[in-house]
Image (cartoon, rainbow, N blue to C red):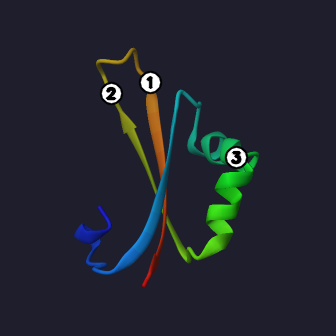
């Protein structure tokens, strides 16, 4: 996804959540995780978020947060 956006040389990490009622609560759940906060503050300068729906999984929503920075 990052390469598709035209960013060629980067550092990145991704957090995936599921079954939260909305993206705000999904993101907030990560704020209680010290490892996630450390990663956010480390060297990342940008964040991308997404949401996906899988009709075959009883309506569960999946959320992603991708943290990245150019090298």
- The answer for how far apart the CA atoms under marks 1 and 3 are is 18 Å
Outermost residue on the bottom side: it is 71
- 30, above or below 66, in the image: above
- 13, above or below 19, in the image: below
- The answer for how far apart the CA atoms under marks 1 and 2 are is 6 Å
Give the SS element for disc 2: loop
For this rendering, which residue is in front, 49 or 35? 35
* Residue plotted at (74% across, 52% down): 34
Residue beneath label 2, please?
54
In the image, taking residue 12 as reference, residue 39 lies left or right, namely right
Q: Quarter of the image holding residue 3?
A: bottom left
* Residue plotted at (31% across, 78% down): 7
Residue beneath label 1, please?
60
For this rendering, which residue is in front, 7 or 54? 7
Q: Earlier in the sequence, mark 1 or mark 2?
A: 2
* Residue plotted at (69% across, 62% down): 38
Q: Earlier in the sequence, mark 1 or mark 3?
A: 3
Q: Quadrant of the C terminus?
A: bottom left
Residue 44 placed where, x, y %?
56, 74
Give the SS element for disc 1: loop
Residue beneath label 3, please?
28
Residue count near mark 1 (Cα–Cα under 10 Å), binned few <14, some 14–19, many ≥20: some
């Amino acid at each position: 996804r990052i390469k598709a956006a035209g960013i060629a040389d980067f550092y990145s990490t991704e957090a995936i959540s599921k079954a939260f009622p909305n993206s705000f609560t999904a993101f907030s759940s990560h704020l209680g995780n010290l490892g996630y906060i450390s990663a956010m503050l480390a060297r990342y300068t940008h964040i991308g978020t997404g949401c996906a729906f899988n009709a075959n999984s009883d309506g569960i929503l999946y959320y992603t947060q991708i943290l990245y920075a150019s090298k």
